[in-house]
Image (spheres, rainbow, N blue to C red):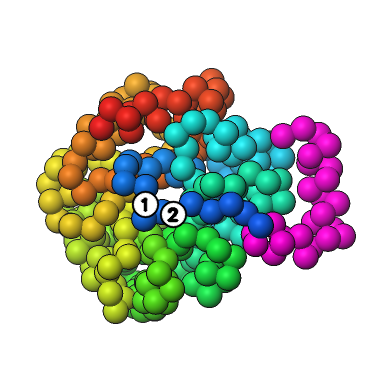
Amino acid sequence: MRDQDYRDLLDRRAWQPERVAAAASARRRRSLWASGRQLLIIAADHPARGMIGVTGRPMAMANRADLLNRVATALSRPGVDGVLGTPDVIEDLLLLGLLDDKIVIGSMNRGGLQGSVFEFDDRFTAYTAEAIARMGFDGGKMLCRIGAEDRATADTLANCAQAVTELAERGLMAMVEPFWSQVVDGVVRHDLSPEGMIRAISVAQALGATSARTWLKVPVVPRMEQIMAATTLPTLLLGGDPAHAPDEVYAAWAKALRLPPVRGLVAGRALLYPPGDDVAAAVDTAVGLLEES
């Protein structure tokens, strides 16, 4: 993205808000359901929950121009299928003309802000199913953290079920990211054991009036074979924070991508902020893993 592109984006944001809807209407679309192969989706919805840090860089995602540059680089690489984001990010990308022929997934519930006392209260504060359909996007993603000791979980489950139903009624994908979670020393922690992940998947895959268009988004953890045996739903792997050595991360992805329900990868920070900051190289490596699976 050139400096002039960014200045033009700022001007359009200020003086031509109608261009957002126009850009969505004019966007060349592709069919999610016709892909028939492993998908690579770039995730860029972290800042909306106050998650602007990456391991070792607490303000990594704070500069919007830098974030957009990184996403633009990722989307330009062969083999990248689309993007997942909140309205602010998706609309920036639309105004920059970067979403032609890409799958677009709108992030829906960002209300459970990281580190807040209401973190389990994952209210739907971003896209709605109606808005996603109106904009011509392909689906909606929701975080579904299940806290057995937190009453807010009941509302989260009900709201996620409603979103799954409303997306399916419009022929759109519902991407559900489930975790069995609890608060430990004031911090929400996920149970990433096979038992914890299987329990979370079992609840999440039954949400809504139909599961016909539900896909799961799950982390790559030990004993993935056992975890993936718990579902028949299409599943995308969660990239996560690049906390480990890249070779170890890629090896774990490669192994998990071969499991029968897995249909690709949704990665954000691991590809947008890799060690060494070579976004293109990190994305190309991920594409290579998909091609080998």
Residue 108 at what x, y percent from top left? 50, 65
Q: Is 44 covered by the magenta stretch?
A: no
| SS at mark 2 in the image | loop
x and y percent of residue 160 in the render? 38, 72
Q: Nearer the viewer, residue 208 or 227?
A: 208
| Residue 58 shown left or right of residue 151 in the figure | right
The residue at the point 28 percent across, 74 percent down is: 210
- Is residue 23 part of the magenta span, yes or no? yes
Element at badge 1?
helix
The amino acid beneath tag 2 is Ser
* Quadrant of the snapshot with the N terminus: top right
Label 1: few (<14), some or many (≥20) within 10 Å? few
The reply to whether residue 179 is visible in this rendering is yes
Q: Residue at x 60, y 48 (%)?
A: 99
Mark linked to residue 34: 1
Q: Which residues are magenta?
A: 1-25
Res 240 → quadrant: top left
132 or 116, which is in the foreground? 132
So how many labels did they put on this image?
2
In the image, residue 37 above or below residue 112? above
Q: Residue at x 81, y 34 (%)?
A: 3
- Determine the residue positioned at 57% across, 58% down: 86
Which residue is under mark 2?
31
User: Is there any visible trace of residue 45 in the rendered image?
Assistant: no
